[in-house]
Image (cartoon, rainbow, N blue to C red):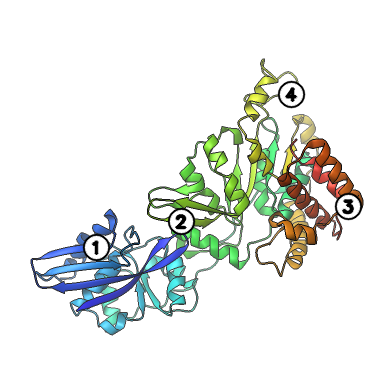
Amino acid sequence: MVTHIRSYALQGLDALPIDVQLQISQGMPAFTIVGLPDKAVGESRERVRAALQSLGLSLPPKRITINLSPANIQKEGSPFDLPIAVGMLVALGAIPVEETAELAVMGELTLDGKILPVPGVLPAAMAAMNEGLGLVCPAANGSEARWAGEMRIIAASDLTALINHFKGTQSIAQPALPRQAPPNVARDMKHVRGQEAARRALEIAASGRHNLLMSGPPGVGKSMLASCMPGIMPPMDSRDILELSMIASIAGLLVNGELSEQRPYRSPHHSSSMAAIIGGGRKALPGEISLAHGGVLFLDELPEFAPQVLESLRQPLENKNVSIARVQAHVSYPANFQLIAAMNPCKCGYLGVAGKACSVAPRCGEQYTAKLSGPLLDRIDVHVEMAAQDTLDMLKTPEGESSATIAARVARTWEIQRMRYKDMPNIRSNADLNDDALKQHAKPSDAAEALLQQSIARLKLSMRAYTRMLRVARTIADMEASQTIEAHHMAEALGYRRM
């Protein structure tokens, strides 16, 4: 007789159904796991054996075979401990077979039978719900699984409680839906004194979800402005929250099952590896660009990042997702992030600042900015240079508009875009406009078109630069609630292009 338990293997955001088959047959005593398991799955037999022994159950002196089907999918990690143990308990008669017929199972076991949390419970719960199944998971993952919807969830803390629940001597309550996580307190724009051009560029970037690069000497407020970005952006919608939560679940970062409406803000150090930024590693986990999905990825000291890391951003910036190729699988993660970058004008940082520039200026600036390739810079819509300001003058400058005031304007601009693109599911902001949508919704006036044509001829702009200028001009027009892109909108958009 073969016992069947449903579980899941994660491949990107997809939870692939796995049939955990268990057979106890006559033969020399053995405990074998087949079906392309990795080392962690292979070690499950020892954890399962010890966990059952802690309950007073010994494995029969027979040949025990576990098959993880389909066998052509790599099985990784410890989530298969619990389905193997449940299958064993069914085979030994400790759990009625009919109790597990409509349940999927995943979880890690300790040697004394406790059930530990595992990553990826949320996508597994959603897959189980789509199949009309309930889910058995660790107690620590119960609240996370509740976000999948109305389904049967058995969140057990140990094997003893799980067995008693199935036998009817103990009841495991349905886990409560957790509260949404409180938003992180972002910096307020009112504390940024002066730098009106940079403040304007940041608002434009937030209003249309455009990529932004700020350049200027140290201490002018680049990092501070970037940290204000989440505070002026509208909360995430349910689609973004769900996708980001699934990514966080796979990465093991979904704390207590709490979801947040606030857009993520990720700021990795410039020494980060490509796997940390793009995603990868032995299990192809999501990287910073996916953890910033729906929010902001801030790269400070942009030229200090490794060249291969910077060049690897080009494809995700265009396609809004990242594909990680491995020998055994190709994994894709969403990566619809907004790039905010900052850099000094040169290695010492004071190029153009009287009395502070180094002895090799301006050659040092040319060498420093040469670390950034033209194709990467071409994908950044808004470039702004921030000048050094006298500290005493800045202290006398009154506070600017607050983040709440700016956020209200940004929200109005987002609402204009939402209504305009409501019939276009793949376009959610002006930064997403494709060629057909540009022709339909970003047609400039005659004067604006003439200015654009002159700029293309004089500056030798690429088609990508042409497209991105139209997107920025469309956002600037939306900020003024203008249906048409006028010449002054186009002129401002042109001023943000890096020549």
**Location of residue 102 with respect to 139 vertically, above or below:** below
x and y, in percent, of residue 140 in the image: 39, 65
Q: Nearer the viewer, mark 4 or mark 2?
A: 2
Q: Nearer the viewer, mark 1 or mark 4?
A: 1
Q: Residues within 10 Å of mark 3 (few under 14, many from 20)?
A: many
x and y, in percent, of residue 312 in the image: 54, 43
Query: Which residue in the structure is indicated by mark 4?
Result: 353
Q: Quadrant of residue 219?
A: top right
Marker disc for residue 34: 1
Give the spatial CA distance, label 4 vs label 2.
47 Å
Is 187 displayed left or right of 253 in the figure? Answer: right
Closer to the camera, 428 or 263?
428
Whichever of labels 3 and 4 marks the residue nearer the N terminus, that label is 4
Query: Which residue in the structure is indicated by mark 2?
Result: 331
Whichever of labels 2 and 1 marks the residue nearer the N terminus, that label is 1
Whichever of labels 1 and 3 marks the residue nearer the N terminus, that label is 1
Is 95 displayed left or right of 485 in the figure? Answer: left
Q: Quadrant of residue 367?
A: top right
Q: Residues within 10 Å of mark 1 (few under 14, many from 20)?
A: some
Asked whether the residues under the numbered discs 2 and 3 touch, taking CB atoms below 8 Å apart as contact, a structural biologist would say: no
Q: Nearer the viewer, mark 3 or mark 4?
A: 3
Query: Which residue in the structure is indicated by mark 3?
Result: 486
